[in-house]
């Protein structure tokens, strides 16, 4: 079905963008529910607030360590942030 490698990579890139966008939306929702700014979340996670903004917009793929820190600061389970269903 995906014998053309260019077609497969296009599908993978599109799926990857959606995953990052969905992840960012979950982080943003949890952050807003906690009434925490991007700058404060970044500070507490040891990253810049602008980096948090890029994650929330789906433009940055955070490390698992950063995701773990975000989950702890926002008091949500890591698995809920990265839920792929």
Image (cartoon, rainbow, N blue to C red):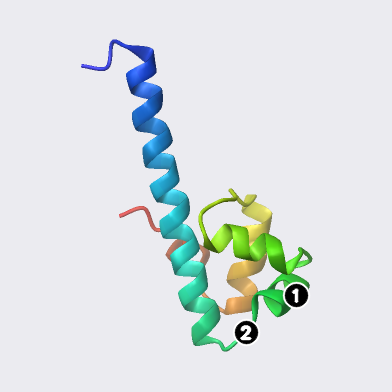
Q: Is residue 14 above or below residue 55?
A: above
Percent of width and height locating residue 18: 39, 49
User: Which residue is rendered at x = 38% and y = 27% of the image?
Assistant: 10
Mark 1, residue position? 44
Q: 41 or 53: nearer the eye?
A: 53
Q: Are marks 1 and 2 in contact (CB under 8 Å)?
A: yes
Q: Is residue 75 above or below residue 12?
A: below
Is residue 71 shown left or right of residue 6?
right
Q: Is residue 11 above or below residue 85?
A: above
Numbered circle sitting on residue 36: 2
Mark closer to the observer (1, 2): 2
Give the number of marks. Answer: 2
Q: 81 or 27: nearer the eye?
A: 27
Percent of width and height locating residue 43: 77, 73
Percent of width and height locating residue 11: 34, 30
- Circle 1 — which element? helix
User: Which residue is rendered at x = 35% and y = 22% of the image?
Assistant: 8
Report crowding for label 1: few under 14, some 14 to 19, many 20 or more residues within 10 A (C-alpha). some
- Circle 2 — which element? loop
């Amino acid at each position: 079905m995906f014998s053309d490698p260019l077609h497969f990579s296009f599908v993978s890139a599109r799926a990857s963008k959606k995953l990052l966008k969905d992840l960012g939306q979950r982080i943003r929702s949890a952050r807003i529910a906690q009434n925490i700014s991007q700058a404060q979340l970044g500070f507490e996670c040891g990253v810049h607030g602008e980096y948090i903004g890029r994650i929330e917009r789906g433009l940055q793929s955070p490390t698992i360590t950063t995701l773990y820190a975000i989950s702890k600061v926002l008091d949500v389970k890591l698995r809920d942030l990265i839920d792929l269903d």
